[in-house]
Amino acid sequence: MHFNDLPRVTLGHLPTPLEPLASLQSTPTGPRVWVKRDDCTGLAFGGNKTRKLEYLLADAEQQGATAIVTFGALQSNHARQTAAACARRGLACALILRDAVGRRVDDYERNANLLYDDLFGAAVHRVPADSTPEAVLKTVLAELAQAGHRPYVVPTGGSSEVGALGYARCALEIAAEFKARGLYPGTVVHATSTGGTQGGLVAGFRYAGLATRVLGINVYKTDSAAIAAEVKTLGQAVLDRLDPTLRLTDEDVEVVDGFLGDGYGKPTAAMVQALRRLASEEGLLFDPVYSGKALAGLLALLEANRLSDDVVFIHTGGAAALPVYASEFLTP
Ligand SMILES: *Cc1c(COP(=O)(O)O)cnc(C)c1O
């Protein structure tokens, strides 16, 4: 099936800008580095979930859904973008948010993404850290049915094979942008967690006929093999829709460890340093949970000379939640 025939609703400001990161091109022989500004997708502070939601909500609407149910941590960027997208499309939205990070700061429990979820009219259901979202899901689905809704359940991070289509489309966008400049995207680097972004990218570059390496910096869990397996499954599912003759192998999926620190949402010194550096040298904001840790990975890989020309860092967003981490950056 041709890509443009897949059902999609328009939510994002696409294509997002592709900008040179001049301050990272310190040596004349080093690779050229670009930032793909998916923090500027336009919907509610932007971020990578908008691309996924364009396909997810099209699928939901095609199935006659009137409500979206999805999952995340308390400060989930995915939940915030889903709530905004539902507001835009006139869908009800229920968010099941687990206190996964355990950050006991008043702002973390009330401000930033949680404030926006509320403004967008989403119903927020909080789940304690020691509980699972599944039990709550049953109740939420029953309540929605009771109110006459037809719910559509979106997995954590929007990472279903439908959501991953958004990042296959992003790969095609990057391929076209580099072709227009007479250049080649040798390596793409980004934060990876639930696998939809990386799976979609890997599938998209393969579909475009490019040998671009996609390096997902693990910011999510110690079991990176589980992330890699998810990436491969989602990527193959995308290819099965586009061109089933294309097969992914384990070598196509590269999940990079070493930048997670003590766990998901827990700040690291390398993240603080990388975030401060790009803010002061480029005027760009990244976030402590995803893009900042991925940036720390990018800097280390550049330092070790492990990336081939041209390098594209995908800014997946998240800076809307930066203020709830203020204490990590400010000296008291
Ligand atoms: C969700 C998210 C990611 C990770 O995307 P996945 O598709 O879940 O791997 C990266 N960065 C930000 C800011 C996110 O919100």
Image (spheres, helix red, strand yellow):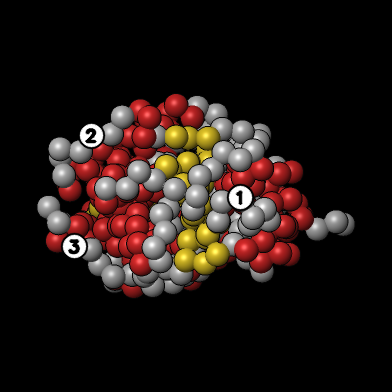
Task: Kindly state the secondary structure of the residue where label 3 is placed.
Answer: helix
Going by the picture, which residue comes out furthest to the left?
1
Residue at position x 76%, y 55% in the image: 329
- Give the image location of residue 120, x and y in percent: 43, 69
**Tag 1–tag 2 contact (CB < 8 Å):** no
- Give the image location of residue 198, x and y in percent: 40, 44
Residue 278 occupies quadrant: bottom right
Q: Which-is-in-front pick, marks 3 and 1?
A: 1
In this view, the residue in front, 80 or 28, is: 28
Image check: 22 left or right of 190? right
The residues bearing labels 1 and 2 have C-alpha atoms spaced at a distance of 32 Å
The residues bearing labels 3 and 1 have C-alpha atoms spaced at a distance of 37 Å
In this view, the residue in front, 51 or 326, is: 51
Q: Which-is-in-front pick, marks 3 and 2?
A: 2
Residue at position x 43%, y 43% in the image: 214
Mark sitting on residue 161: none
In this view, the residue in front, 36 or 158, is: 36
Measured along the vertical axis of the image, is residue 296 above or below residue 261?
below
Q: Is tag 3's residue or tag 1's residue first in the polypeptide sequence?
A: 3
Q: Which residue is mark 2?
A: 247
Q: Is tag 1's residue or tag 2's residue first in the polypeptide sequence?
A: 1
- Give the image location of residue 92, x and y in percent: 32, 64
Q: Which residue is mark 3?
A: 4
Q: Which residue is mark 1?
A: 30
Residue at position x 14%, y 61% in the image: 5
Query: Few, some or many C-alpha atoms within 10 Å of disc 2 (few <14, some 14-19, many ≥20)?
Result: some
Q: Is tag 3's residue or tag 2's residue first in the polypeptide sequence?
A: 3
- Give the image location of residue 199, x and y in percent: 35, 42
Specify the amino acid type for callout 2. Arg
Query: Few, some or many C-alpha atoms within 10 Å of disc 1 (few <14, some 14-19, many ≥20)?
Result: some
